[in-house]
């Protein structure tokens, strides 16, 4: 299958992305038989849903009188709750595998281990700390929403291009089973993510786009050198890196 060409396919792809990348549930159906590789362009819409829920939590608790720091912490907790820590899990697995394995096979083996090691724990703490401090610096609920929108939609817009440009590192697993992402599908997802960056203003969008390009290229090269391709964990880690990058830019542009 390829990119969506009919309104029903558009809705099916958005629904599939919401169900796969979040814990949100829709009325049960087969999403028109679409595969994850077909629907990956719609991943930014899952990010939009996460951003709206997180921003809503921030707005409610801040209007109730909570300070910026605790409000940001609860907003972050909401994002992890609605996604089931899917991407945080990928980041910790990558940190443990890349940091603790000596060979490609050993790295992949560690990444499949459900236990978390020192590298993984440190990566999670760093991710949470950076995102929390960045959100805490923003000037109110409106700016928090804009930052979350840009960060969550854009970071997920990178998925299609990453899967397209790297081969699966395993013959089995989530990434291998997702299917092949076409150039068109990858481009649509990236374009939607790029548009979401405009929430930071034109200057912020340009800066974030440049930084994301550098992060994307560096992480792609790292994955190729470490395990020879991509897995579901690398996609999760990429989302975290993208989210962090955009939130850091937002902390400069939206204060």
Image (cartoon, rainbow, N blue to C red):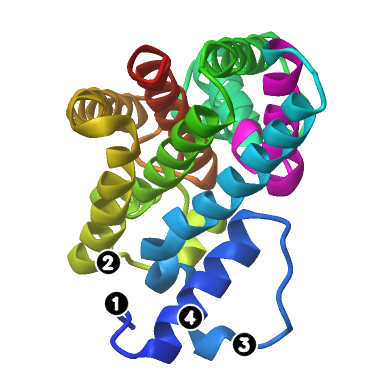
What is the distance, in whole Å, between disc 2 and disc 4 at their CAs?
15 Å
Which mark lies nearer to you, 3 or 4? 4
Q: Earlier in the sequence, mark 3 or mark 4?
A: 4
Give neighbour class at mark 3: few <14, some 14-19, many 20+ (Cα, 10 Å).
Answer: few
Q: Label 4, on which residue?
A: 11
Query: How far apart are labels 3 and 4 at the CA level?
Result: 12 Å
Sequence-first tag of 2 and 4: 4
The answer to whether residue 171 is magenta is no
Of 109 and 81, nearer the camera is 81
Q: CA distance from mark 3 to mark 1?
A: 17 Å
Chief SS of the magenta region: helix
Mark toward the start of the polypeptide (4 vs 1): 1
Residue at (69% x, 31% y) in the render: 58
Q: Which residue is at the front of the view, 216 or 193? A: 193
Identify the secondary structure beneath mark 1: loop
Label 1 vs 2, first from the N-terminus: 1
Q: Which mark is residue 3?
A: 1
Q: Which residue is mark 2?
A: 185
Alpha carbon distance from label 3 to label 2: 20 Å
- Res. 79 image quadrant: top right
Residue at 68% x, 46% y is 83
Which residue is denoted by mark 3 in the rendering? 30
Q: Are marks 2 and 4 in contact (CB under 8 Å)?
A: no
Mark pair 4, 1: CA separation = 12 Å
Range shown magenta: 69-88
């Amino acid at each position: 299958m390829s990119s969506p060409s009919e309104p029903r396919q558009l809705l099916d792809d958005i629904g599939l992305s919401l169900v796969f990348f979040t814990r949100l549930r829709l009325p049960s159906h087969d999403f028109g038989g679409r595969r994850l590789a077909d629907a990956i362009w719609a991943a930014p819409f899952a990010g939009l849903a996460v951003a709206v829920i997180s921003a809503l939590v921030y707005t409610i608790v801040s209007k109730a009188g909570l300070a910026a720091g605790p409000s940001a912490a609860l907003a972050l907790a909401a994002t992890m709750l609605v996604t089931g820590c899917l991407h945080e899990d990928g980041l910790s697995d990558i940190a443990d595998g890349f940091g603790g394995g000596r060979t490609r096979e050993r790295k992949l083996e560690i990444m499949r281990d459900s236990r978390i090691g020192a590298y993984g724990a440190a990566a999670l703490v760093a991710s949470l700390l950076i995102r929390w401090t960045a959100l805490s610096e923003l000037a109110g609920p409106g700016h928090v929403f804009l930052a979350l929108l840009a960060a969550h939609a854009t970071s997920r817009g990178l998925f299609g291009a990453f899967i397209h440009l790297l081969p699966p590192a395993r013959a089995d697993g989530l990434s291998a089973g997702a299917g092949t992402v076409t150039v068109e599908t990858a481009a649509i997802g990236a374009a939607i993510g790029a548009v979401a960056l405009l929430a930071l203003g034109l200057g912020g969008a340009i800066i974030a786009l440049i930084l994301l390009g550098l992060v994307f290229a560096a992480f792609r090269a790292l994955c190729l050198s470490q395990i020879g391709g991509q897995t579901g964990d690398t996609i999760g880690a990429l989302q975290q890196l993208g989210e962090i990058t955009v939130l850091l830019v937002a902390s400069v542009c939206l204060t």
